[in-house]
Amino acid sequence: MHNKAPRFYIARRGDILWYKAWGIRAIAIALALLLCGFITMAATGLDPIKVYVTMLDGNFGTSRRFWMLLQNMAILLCVSLALAPAFRMHFWNLGGDGQSLMGALGAAACMICIGDRIPNVLLIIIMIAVSISCGIIWAVIPAYFKARFGTNETLFTLMMNYVATQLVAFFVIIWEVPKGSGKIGIINQSTQAGWFPQIGTNKYLLNIIIVLFITVFIFIYMRYSKHGYELAVVGESEATARYAGIKINRVIIRTMALSGAICGITGLLLVGGTDHTLTTTIVAGRGFTGVMVAWLAKFNPFVMIATTFLLVFLERGSAEITTIFGLNQSFGDIITGIILFFILSSDFFLNYKITKTKTQKEAA
């Protein structure tokens, strides 16, 4: 009995041209929108075109909505940029939330404790230094234990998120205004001490500019610097890194210090540039969403801008259709989930191709 050879097989794809890669992603998004349209009509009876137009209006309908879109993009992108070097090194840093929270705590502490005692320029400089330092400390702790004792960095960084949350909760109770309210409220609302300066009429423009500078820096760092080369080698093979004379423990700690510093800046931007307060939910899970952004973009900082836009657009758009059409919040999440599923699935076709098996006649 002869076994029939399969008519098709899956083979790993070589390097793919960038426009073909984006073409595959565009097809995935188009198919996702088509499926979401059918689900929308079947489940709600609404015109899917109106739903999609409402999602666009929720992001671009007014100048304020547009700037809120850019601001949310900037914060998420900042966390994602922080995680990219560590993930490129195969250090699974799930502590973006905790490291950003510690940066936010450092900035809030400066505003509350010394905000009325020193000039605003000096205060902001101290806030920058303290926020970055707090983020670095929170990131270097798991990095040191990974380098020194080989601990599991995934669990370590994840657990430190909870510690950071409880630390923030502790200080919120200490600084609460008024007493018994369980929250701080707007810090230095009358004096605006520690608030970032506004550029023109655009409240969030400074945040966006800062994050764009970080994007360029991370791209150059990972693509062209010696440190970027070393972390890439460590990520590919620790044995090769050791053979090349790279000190792996030093690379781990140095890379995580960079991740922690940028997460600290994220917390600083939230407290000093956006919310002007401190809560346990101020980071809002962006440390976990940033993991998806980094992976979708293949750790390319400029591609991360596009993936960040997509995720923020979907989040704000789903909230808008929930409000306008009186739908359950879960429906917006379903649409977001389907679109993300198709985009993530498209990675299969970027890395593999389905090839027809040649018959003996074709092979001859």
Image (tube, grey):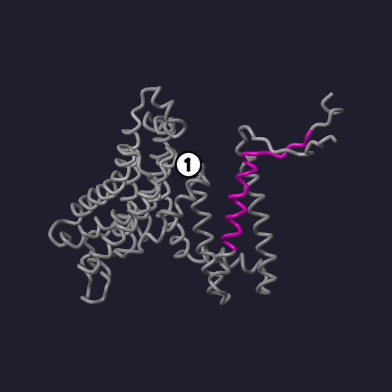
Magenta stretch, residue numbers:
335-357
Quarter in which the N terminus is drawn: top right
Of residues 315 and 231, the one nearer the viewer is 231
User: Picture coordinates of residue 342 (x, y %)?
Assistant: 62, 53
- Residue lying at 40% horizontally and 22% vertically, measured from the top left: 243
Quick one: which residue is furthest to the front in this view?
1
Question: Is there any visible trace of residue 121 in the rendered image?
Answer: yes
Image-based side of 356 in relation to 216, left or right: right
Report if residue 345 lies within the magenta region. Answer: yes
Image-based side of 52 in relation to 221, left or right: right
Q: Relative to residue 149, is residue 344 depicted above or below?
A: below
Please name the residue that numbered disc 1 is placed on: 299
Of residues 114 and 135, the one nearer the viewer is 135
Image-based side of 133 in relation to 214, left or right: left
User: Picture coordinates of residue 306 (x, y %)?
Assistant: 52, 49
Image-based side of 286 in relation to 335, left or right: left
- Residue lying at 87% horizontally and 28% vertically, measured from the top left: 361
